[in-house]
Image: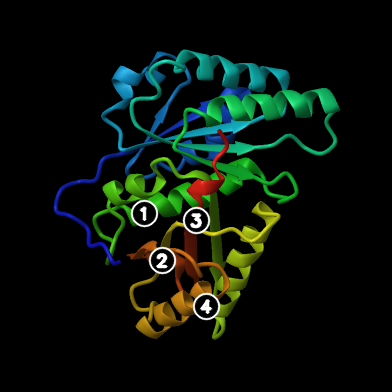
Amino acid sequence: MINSCRAQLPMPIALAGVGPSGESALQRLRAQQQPNVHFLRNDDSLAPDLLHKFGLLILVAELESVEDCNAVQALAQKVQSSGFGTNTLYVVMKPAATVGERQKVLAHYSLQMLEMHADATVVVPENSGEDLGVWLTDRVASLAQAVANDAFAGIDVDDLTGLLRNAGSTVWASAQSEGVDRVDAAVKAICKQHAQHVSVEPVYQQAMIWVQGARESLKLSEMRSLMKSLGQQILKDTPRLVFCVAYDESLGTRMRVSALLCRPQMRSS
């Protein structure tokens, strides 16, 4: 299904860091002034009666310390009875493998507490080798551009939140490539990131794919090849698919492919 941009402005995306490490991870994004992204603090701004005006709330946590875990648990208790009042995507990075067993247990418990109140949860693997700030900048920036009004066939925020609502465990992959074989390179990178998130082959029920590139660079033949390759390797059992193409002249000869892959039947209870 290809969704065209609507005439009205999309509902904005809100971001908030939970705990000192989560807030620190957002500093790189704050400096870029992304379109359609509003930054909130983990205080009274996260009250459910204020969040309803946002289309999507993205909560960011990095469970590296006791302070991070305590902040996540405090927020989970705050919204225990009411929820967040809007669709919520929880992005969390587990602590490094070198931390003590006690911190790992505390982080796992904290993750589960907040996960119960989020529509979708993306866990950044601790073995990904990525800095959370860099990871967020790449993915959130591309998402913000894809919901902008100048997209060729953009993501409507209603489509995005409809996909994430009650989605549970979610994979958020992103890859840039260039050259003659840039479609194959992007597919391989997406598949590699997908493999880092899952230990068994999942059955996806919903997926959103968005492709970005310079106006003169994107070719329809590449879009067909991309969807065919992803369909064969990852999206075999995905009855609902949202696909979009957005222009980003800063990419030059490069192509950026992003994917949100949801499998609601694996959501933790």
Amino acid carrying label 1: it is Gln
Q: Residues within 10 Å of mark 1 (few under 14, many from 20)?
A: many
**Marks 4, 2: nearer the viewer:** 4
Q: SS class of the residue under badge 4?
A: helix
Q: Earlier in the sequence, mark 1 or mark 2?
A: 1
Evaluate if marks 3 and 4 touch, with contact meaning CB atoms under 8 Å apart. no
Evaluate if marks 1 and 2 touch, with contact meaning CB atoms under 8 Å apart. yes
**Marks 1, 4: nearer the viewer:** 4
Q: SS class of the residue under badge 2?
A: strand
Nearest the viewer among 210 and 108 is 108
Evaluate if marks 3 and 2 touch, with contact meaning CB atoms under 8 Å apart. no
Q: Quadrant of the C terminus?
A: top right
Q: Quadrant of the N terminus?
A: bottom left
Disc number for residue 95: none
Find disc 3 in the rendering and name its residue.
261
Q: Is residue 200 visible?
A: yes
Q: Earlier in the sequence, mark 1 or mark 4?
A: 1
Q: Earlier in the sequence, mark 1 or mark 3?
A: 1
- Residue at 67% across, 17% down: 67
Distance CA(mark 3)–CA(mark 4):
15 Å
Q: Residues within 10 Å of mark 4 (few under 14, many from 20)?
A: some
